[in-house]
Every structure is written in C-alpha cells, then in structure tokens.
Image: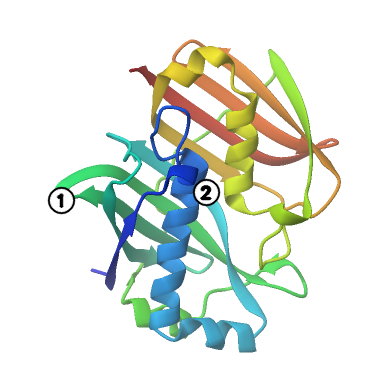
Amino acid sequence: MGEIYRESIVIKSHETDSNGRLSIPMLVRLLLYVSNRQTERLGNTCILQEKGLTWFILQHDLTIHQMPKVDDTITVETEALSYNKFFTYRRFKVFINDTVFVETVMKFALVDMIERKLVRIDPKFVNVYKAERLSTSQKMTKIKRLDVCSDSQEYSIRQTDIDMNQHVNNAVYLEWIWKSLPNIYHDKLPKHLAIIYENEVRSGKVQHYCQNEEKVTYHVIKAEDLNLARAVILWEYL
C-alpha cells in the first residue's frame, strides 16, 4: 500500500460548468494539484529538479459516480499505487463525507527535460511514496483510433495553455474536447473518461476531431498529421 495523502477543497463558482457541477478540466487540475502537494510534502520535487527530470502524464481513466457542485467541500485522496521500469500508477478518489464521487488512475512516466524523452525509473525516486514494484504494466483502457470523424474544430495554443513542463497542460486537452461537444451532451453526465497523451505540443494550432455514437464519443487531437491525444467518453443522461 502506497503513502496516502488527502486534502480538502471548496468548489468555487469559476470551477463549475453551466449546470453548476465541477467541470472535468478543472477536476483534473485539482487532482494534479493534490498529487503535486504530496510530492512537495515528501521533498521529492527538488530531487527531480536537480536531476533535470519531471513526471509526465501518459493516460488517465476517470470513473464518475456523481459530480461535486459549487460550494461543496470535497476531499481529494491520492496514493502512488505501483511502478515498473518506465511507468508509475497513481490512484485518486474524490469524497464528500464518506461518499465516493470520482475515482481515477493516472499513468505517469519520468522524463528528461532536456532530451524530452522517457528515462528508466530509479527506485529512489518512488520509494518515498511506498509504491509497490511491478514487473508488468497495469491494465488501462484501450482507445480505438478514429477512421471517420463527424466533426472537427481548430484551436490556437495560448501562452496560458503552457505549464511548468513547457508544454500544453493536460487539462487544456479536455477543455478543447468540451468546447467542441455538440449541445446534446451538455445535458448528459460523463460516467467514464479515458484519455491517452501521445505527443506533447508547445505552440501553433491543433485540430480536435470527434466521432459521436449516441452514448459514446471518441476524440482525437492533432497538430497537422501528428496525434497528440486520444480520448473516449461514456455518457449518461441526467
């Protein structure tokens, strides 16, 4: 069992959507905020920075039971579950009192910031989290590649989209997806979302393509012919 960290957060109005629920992009921002807080508390941030390394998210799988609303006080719990030679897996849960609203697992890799490439994970970088060492990869959602897309939208990358890792913040990809959704989905609740980050981008324009299949939408974000991210969302009517 890994080291567990919890933090309470009050949902602000600017963090919600038109239905008063916490937005998916903001949810991801809050989860990453809490994981970063744990890393800082454990003193791991400075060690990685000295080595020119940082954690990149490769994928996350979100299961949504309910969405918190404005003024709700949520507790975000995170735990570094496991790691192997190249990947680590971190679990999150969002509670209100004893009720679980959201559960997710994120897959991370350790990246050399100069070379912009994955490096092997030295156990000393993860031992502080008490994560379990695995010989295989943890199973994550597989997302199909799109052949035919029913809709597309172009977005320009803004300076405010760039994070401390000098690329577009992971939550911004979800903002692009949500901005592109047809109106019919604004009255639905996402029950499961999986997104894979394939390549980073730091400037220019991106294209979002969407394929709708009633209760499932498939998404791909590209920069010219390069796939940046793929996502799948399972919806439920409110």
The front one of 70 and 143 is 70
Instruction: Tell which of 18 and 220 is nearer to you.
Output: 18
The quadrant in which the N terminus is found is bottom left
Q: Label 2 sits on what residue type?
A: Gln
Q: Secondary structure at mark 2?
A: strand
Q: How many marks?
A: 2
Which amino acid lies under the numbered mark 1 shown in the image of this protein? Asn
Quarter where residue 153 is shown: top right
Q: Is residue 140 left or right of residue 47?
A: left
User: Which element is circle 1 on?
Assistant: loop
**Image point (47%, 60%), residue name:** 32
- At x 77%, y 55%, the residue is 159
| Residue 172 visible in rendering | yes
Cβ–Cβ below 8 Å for labels 1 and 2?
Answer: no
Where's the C terminus, which quadrant?
Answer: top left
Q: Which mark is drawn over residue 59?
A: 2
Q: Is residue 191 above or below residue 136?
A: above
Q: Earlier in the sequence, mark 1 or mark 2?
A: 2
Q: Is residue 130 above or below residue 163?
A: below
x, y percentage for residue 48? 57, 82
Q: Is residue 155 above or below residue 149?
A: below
Q: Position of residue 91 (x, y in %)?
A: 34, 56
Query: Which residue has dot 1 on it?
Result: 97
| Gap between marks 1 and 2 measured at Cα | 28 Å
Numbered circle sitting on residue 70: none
Quarter holding residue 235:
top left
Q: Which percent across, then down, holds residue 9?
A: 33, 58
Along the viewing direction, whichever of 237 and 92 lies nearer the viewer: 237
